[in-house]
Image (cartoon, rainbow, N blue to C red):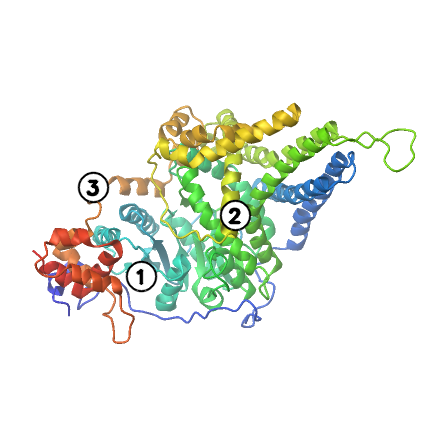
Amino acid sequence: MDALEPALPDSLRAARPGGFRALPDESPMDMAVQSLSAAPDTHGRGRVPLTEPAMIALRRLAVIGSACLLTGYGAYEMNRVLNSMGVSTLGVVLLVLFVLLFQWIALAFTSAVGGFVSLLRQGGMGLGVSREGPLPALSTRTALLMPTYNESPGRVMAGLRAMYDSLAATGRLEAFDFFILSDTTNPDIWVEEEAAFLALRDATGGHGRIFYRRRPVNTERKAGNIAEWVRRFGGAYPQMVTLDADSLMAGEAVVRIAAAMERHPGVALIQTLPEIVNGTTLFARMQQFAGRVYGPLIAHGIAWWHGAEGNYWGHNAIIRTRAFAEQAGLPHLPGRKPFGGHILSHDFVEAALMRRGGWAIHMVPGLAGSYEESPPSLTDIAIRDRRWCQGNLQHAKVVSARGLHWVSRMHMLMGIGSYVTSPMWLVFLLAGILISLQSRFEKPEYFGDTKSLYPHWPHVDPEQAKYVFIGTMAILLAPKLMAYVALLFDRASRQGCGGAARAAASIVVETLIGGLVAPVAMLIQTSGVLSILMGQDSGWNAQRRDDGGTPFGDIVRSYWRYTLFGLVLGGCAWTVSIPLFLWMTPVLLGLAFAIPLAALTGSRAVGQAFRRAGLLLIPEETAPPDILRRAAAAVAALPPAPPAGDGAHLLLADPVLMAAHRAMLPPPRRRGDPINPDLLVGLVKLEEGTARDAAIRSLTRGEKAAILASREGLDRLRGLA
């Protein structure tokens, strides 16, 4: 027994007689690493899940076949535009790029049509999940997993408190346990996490229901965090709900998807549609408005034709633990980073492997009560996107894995395409300028090598080009119109968005500002793709979730190159052709004003001005549901955060926290285990006779983390004056 264990109060001993326990008894579950080249073991499960919707093949034929027909027609019309000049290398390049890009928006359009039909028919629930009515009884236990990495502990625990209370209100709390799975590397945040965990237990009385574990080594990031929990505790929980640090799920929603898993033993995963909430900056408000208005249409569409071959977005989903352990052990990819190593975008791959093993993967977009938050600015979303880009490009090494369902392969290809299309759009624009330049300066061949009474006038057909442009824009914007029509049929959502007129005005505002931001985002993603191809790893940084503004000087330093590129591009277009310049004006404006756009969209004041004007409203802010009110109240009740960098002093000042901290430490190092050099250096710095404050300040982050993770280090720290 630790020397400080008697200092633990009764409240900390309540979890189990004989001492404080931050974790329950382990219930190991084997989780083998899967092979991408060997045939999977389906354990006798059939190729077609029992929950596959009827006539799913016809749905897929309608969506994909219609997209192919649209693409073929678009290619024919674009070829008519270009072939008036005859065949040229630039013309072929432009046509190929057009086909690749057009099929992307054509598939989004035809999928949205399916979503529109599903929405109007009130579909999209699936698996017998009901949005209303009595809550079902539960017969199994489910774990709610909250991975966290250097996040604000107060905000994380406030969200958990809201979900705990919401589940308690359903009367089904006894079926759920909560796990805080920390991968935090900042030692000061780590100590704050422990203090917040103890406070959450005390506030809820959930000593035997709320658990905390910190991994000293962040092997394989979030995927490794979840897998480690499965291997240690998965045997006690048939289901697990995966969350993100900004996730919120209403108790009713969790109960309903847990009951659906009990009713359908062949289902491995049920993905909900998280709605974006709590946005305050203009950028975040645009994101949440777009997600709330267009998101259901898109999600209903993909659920309509994906069927039991759905996808996983990494959070706000419930997973059958046995299926995950049996099929989702991720292998390391061959080669060096950024393409080799552990898989970053693990969620797509885990869903594909479970489906490969005969399990069904479903989405229920019509279920309310699932929420997340958006990064507050273009800069923050670019940082997150850089990591996602690397993870999705890694899927090039996974998409050919043996035994994958063709829809799962399509998920990965679409994930890769979501980033590769940005450099393709850029090349498409540049090729258009070069073709215009060629048509202006190249000496025309009026008769060529054949005898002809009439000359061949080489030019790009501007009238035909205009029709192609109009048709492309119509297909691109049609899903927004369909989403607006669907909104008009939903009285509560329509009123929550400020009424029909304000909702329409908000769509116009979001479309115009989003159109200006799009070229900047295109260049950001293009630079991300190029840096990855050159071998640069994205790393793993904590995401900024507050709405604190970025200093204007930092914005200028980050975005001046996009402004310069826009000015140069505009100058080239003007020199080549004034009609070309006018055609490219939306792109050029977005690039030329990249700096003020980034500043204004990342501004909280501007975002709140739009809210006061009744624009970009969503129902979740005009009439917040219970879970959001609970979370807001929990955040408001948070005590002031301790001074930054004060984790060691916080432990030394609070004997109860120190005792709990020591009780949660991993076992001491055994003979033969690797030596931690940070610990050795830290112990030297804490030699007797050194002033405590000075010694703590002398520690690096790694040394401080090693000291706080060592009983010897804590004893030496406590012994300093």
In the image shown, does 318 or 655 lie closer to the viewer? Answer: 655
Q: Give amino acid for label 3.
A: Pro
Q: Give amino acid for label 1.
A: Arg
Q: Position of residue 717 (x, y in %)?
A: 13, 59
Q: Relative to 420, does residue 665 appear above or below in the rendering?
A: below
Disc with the residue nearer the chain's start (1 vs 3):
1
Residue placed under numbered mark 2 in the picture: 529
Quarter placement of the C terminus = bottom left
In the image shown, does 277 or 396 lie closer to the viewer? Answer: 396
Residue placed under numbered mark 3 in the picture: 640
Residue in the picture at 58% in, 62% down: 49
Mark 3: few, some, or many residues within 10 Å (few <14, many ≥20)? few
Q: Give amino acid for label 2.
A: Val
Q: CA distance from mark 2 to mark 1?
A: 31 Å
Q: Position of residue 445 (x, y in %)?
A: 82, 33
Q: Relative to 528, does residue 46 appear above or below in the rendering?
A: below
Q: CA distance from mark 1 to mark 3?
A: 27 Å
Residue placed under numbered mark 1 in the picture: 215
Disc with the residue nearer the chain's start (3 vs 2):
2
Residue in the picture at 36% in, 56% down: 144
Image quadrant assignment for residue 47: bottom right
Can the viewer see residue 184?
A: yes
Can the viewer see residue 129?
A: no
Answer left or right for 431 relative to 26: right
Answer left or right for 441 relative to 318: right
Q: Position of residue 131 (x, y in %)?
A: 47, 46
What kind of element bears circle 1?
loop
Label 2 close to label 1 by CB (< 8 Å): no
Mark 1: few, some, or many residues within 10 Å (few <14, many ≥20)? some
- Give the residue at the far bottom of this rendering: 671
Label 1 close to label 3 by CB (< 8 Å): no
Q: CA distance from mark 3 to mark 2?
A: 41 Å
